[in-house]
Amino acid sequence: MIHAAAALFVVLVLGRIFLLEPITIASDSMSPQVSEGAHALLLKTPATTTGPNTDDLVVFSAPDDGTISLKRVIAVAGQEIAIIDGVVYVDGVRRLEPDIDPKAIDATYFGPILVEPNTVFVLGDNRGPSIDSRDYGAVPLGNMRGRILHVWN
């Protein structure tokens, strides 16, 4: 019994260090889907050349100042991104964003740009106050800490 408890403890500690990490969301840039103060489970993933997928919620170090950030992957390497009057287009196709509050989308223009290899283009769901790839460019895969598995308040 003691051996099983010790083994479970070791697995939990190693899992926390290398695989899963509970985090608290520190900004409202992802609201209304992920509110400031919400809790999330981060799956730590090593930087790879494949990287995260479109629509993944990812945690990374911002390229401009190293701030730990949570954003949504909008486009991956090799895709073209443009924002026309607040509407996002990926490879010339309007991106469907049913979870985004249209009142939170500012009438901005951006791009078009091609997402470079080994990077991803990220945006906050709450576009107005979000500081994201429109400001600091695509995020290198080496800056990724992981992707969000689950969010709860």
Image: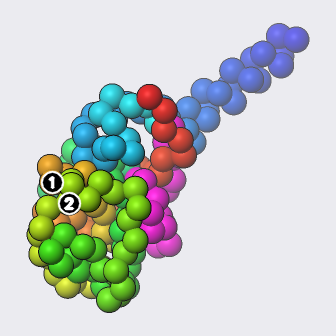
Q: How is the image coloured?
A: rainbow
Residue 122 against residue 88 in the figure, above or below: above
Answer with left or right where residue 150 lies relative to residue 74: right
Q: How far is disc 1 from disc 2 in space, using C-alphas?
A: 6 Å
Residue range of the region highlighted in magenta in the rendering: 41-58
> Residue at the spot x=39%, y=31% of the render?
38
Q: Amino acid at mark 2?
A: Ile
Query: Is residue 38 in view?
Result: yes
What label sits on residue 105 in the rendered view? Answer: 2
Residue 127 against residue 39 in the figure, above or below: below
Q: Residue 131: x percent and y percent? A: 17, 54
Pick the residue in front: 24 or 127. 127
Question: Does dot 1 land on a helix, a strand or a loop?
Answer: loop
> Residue at the spot x=34%, y=80% of the render?
94
C-beta proximity under 8 Å, tags 1 and 2: yes
Nearer-N-terminus badge (1/2)? 2
Q: Main secondary structure of the magenta part?
A: loop
Answer with left or right where residue 92 lies relative to residue 152: left
Answer with left or right where residue 65 lies relative to residue 33: left
Query: Is 55 within the magenta?
Result: yes
- Quarter of the image that includes the C terminus: top left
Res. 112 image quadrant: bottom left
Query: Is 29 within the magenta?
Result: no
Question: Does dot 2 land on a helix, a strand or a loop?
Answer: loop
